[in-house]
Image (tube, rainbow, N blue to C red):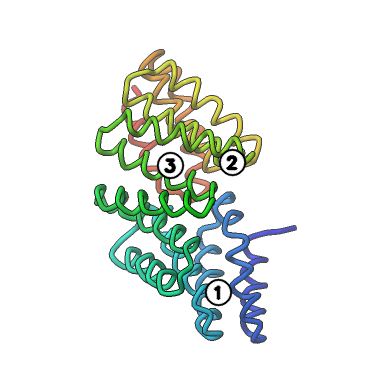
Amino acid sequence: MLSGQNIVAATHQAASRGLHSIAWQLPDTLWSFFFLRSYWSDWRSAHQTGLAAAREARNRQAEGWMLSSLGDLDVELLRPDEYSVRLHEKSVAIFRQMGDREGEARALCGLGHCQIYMRRLEKAIECEQQALTISREIGYPYRQGLALRYLGQAYCDLGRLEEAMDCHRQALAIRRELGDRWNEAVSLNDLGRVFCDLRRFEDAIESTERSLAIAREVRHLWGEARSLQYLGIALWHTQGMDAARPCWQEALAIFTELGAPQADEVRACLAESP
């Protein structure tokens, strides 16, 4: 059965035998598996090995991919810092030097996402707009959806809620067209967050319940917990703490099991419970 530890072991074995292309292709191909299952330590170990292998083989494109993925991990763990920014900036520089526009869009997306969590929102918007422009020019719909999602996050954090709503709706439409159920759920939950900020709580309940159903369908535990978190917020405003508490308790259990930092946010919500 596929597991994070199996991928790490295979990556290390490939690197030790000088099979450099396999050592970076494995983690790059399966990064979504690490994310979907929240295998944080395995993600880091496999990609660090992949980065070393790419550099040993002098494969600049693979180096850029590994750098970007390692920077993404710090953001997912809510621990981005200047080192994370530099990882993404190195990735952007590599792809620009190579003239690899697809890679550049990928790296810019990651850099912008990192800047959101560094609270450099205007810089984040600049990165995501560049990534979106490139992705549209080269016909890269998956990356368009991701850039729109991160733009929506930045706009939401700035209180530019109508712009955030527009971005998330565009991202949702792209993901549905692609049949990308996992990211469809992410977009629905993003819309739920904006609806909450707009105090449109009934709309937030509908959106987060749909997100929750899809997250359970695709077995995305982190997405399930995040949907429960925002569903709880909407229920708290409309039906009170008794309705919200079970959502937050379930979200907390999942986040805690995954070692996800969002557990602290849910604990803060539950602390308001009598």
What amino acid is found at the position of numbered circle 1 in the picture? Gly
Cα distance, mark 2 to mark 3?
Answer: 13 Å
Residue under pointer 2: 182
Is residue 221 positioned above or below 73 on the image?
A: above
Q: Which labelled disc corresponds to residue 2?
A: none
Residue under pointer 1: 50
Disc nearer the start of the sequence (2/1)? 1
Q: In which quarter of the image is the N terminus?
A: bottom right
Mark 2, residues whose alpha carbon is within 10 Å: few (<14), some, or many (≥20)?
Answer: many
Residue under pointer 3: 149
Looking at the image, which is closer to me, 74 or 130? Answer: 130
Mark 1, residues whose alpha carbon is within 10 Å: few (<14), some, or many (≥20)?
Answer: many
Mark 3, residues whose alpha carbon is within 10 Å: few (<14), some, or many (≥20)?
Answer: many
Looking at the image, which is closer to me, 82 or 142? Answer: 142
Disc nearer the start of the sequence (3/1)? 1
Which residue reaches farthest top? 239
Cα distance, mark 2 to mark 1?
Answer: 26 Å
Is residue 150 positioned above or below 87 on the image?
A: above
Q: Which residue is located at x 54 percent, y 53 percent?
A: 35
